[in-house]
Image: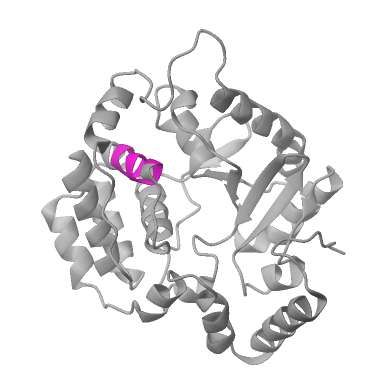
Amino acid sequence: TERESPPVGLAGVLSRIESGRAAPAVPERPRMSPVTARLVAVEGALEPVLESLAGQGVGVWAWKGIDYARSLYPDPSMRSMSDADLFVRPRDMRSTAGAFLRSGWTMMNPGAPLLTSMVVGAVTLRRGSLDADLHCHPLYFPWALPGRLPPDLFESPRRCGRLLLGFRWAHATLLHLLHMSSHRRRRPEWWLDLALLCGRMTPSDWLSLSYWGAASGLGGSLAVILEDCMASTGRGAPGRALEALRRGPSREGMAALAARGRGLPTVSAALAGTGWRRTSFCAAMIYRLAAGRPAAVPVAVR
């Protein structure tokens, strides 16, 4: 895919964040900022669901903005977010979605069949003006990852508030890099997130990330992102980690296709699928086209 450089001025913004001052785009206010107010509203809406899941022994991981606002930034108002990204083990997707539905949330497209069959790795749940994206894989199309994720991804979690977990820093940084690699256009806050994540990494964390980043089959792309982060913010990976990422097997063709957008991920998902997964995916897409369905419509889980 076409390489997009980070925006200019990120180093100055990062310095302001780390000194405890709000970024220029988020002026300090004596009262709760709209950004913090939205975070509090999202956390309040999630609490009944998370309490129900905790009672069932189901762990839920905070991911991206809802994690970083509490864990990386000195003040939550410095990290805006449009929705809450949550991560669960693949085996817990159905029970987690069910807990949301029982609490008054609505599941949007693509719905349960494509989700539980791992044709897609995420679904959006909505309640009023609040959205929660439920993930079981860092990429929307799991097949676009040519290699492997760490088998201990969900082990030794951090605490992220009372009811949410957080990935340990090596895995949080790896998942963030994989997320960035799947998008042609990368938001400025993603680069700041990555710089702050790099600041939490230890030598052993970099060893873990370089090994599993190479095992993902996307090591070359991840190394480029880390180099660009270093150039724009002064934060990045040590040279040995970059070398290890590049030494891994490069199998980035399908991932590059998925990142191009404009319908190509959907077409390539149909081509890459096999057996009943390809049949169910193609049938769902044909139905949506015939019915003139929008990009997100409510569906039910039985």
Q: Residue at x 58, y 41 (%)?
A: 82
Q: Is residue 244 above or below residue 99?
A: below
Could you tell me if residue 147 is visible in this image?
A: no
Give the magenta range. Answer: 189-196
Residue 100: percent from left, percent from top: 77, 48
In this orientation, which residue lies closer to the viewer: 156 or 108? 108
In this orientation, which residue lies closer to the viewer: 134 or 287? 287
Q: Is residue 193 magenta?
A: yes
Q: Residue at x 15, y 50 (%)?
A: 238
- For residue 218, what is the image quadrant? bottom left
Q: Is residue 135 above or below residue 266?
A: above
In this orientation, which residue lies closer to the viewer: 164 or 129? 129
Number of dots carrying numbers: 0
Residue 227: percent from left, percent from top: 19, 54
Q: Residue at x 19, y 69 (%)?
A: 246
Q: Residue farthest to the left?
A: 239
Residue 107: percent from left, percent from top: 77, 56
Residue 113: percent from left, percent from top: 75, 72
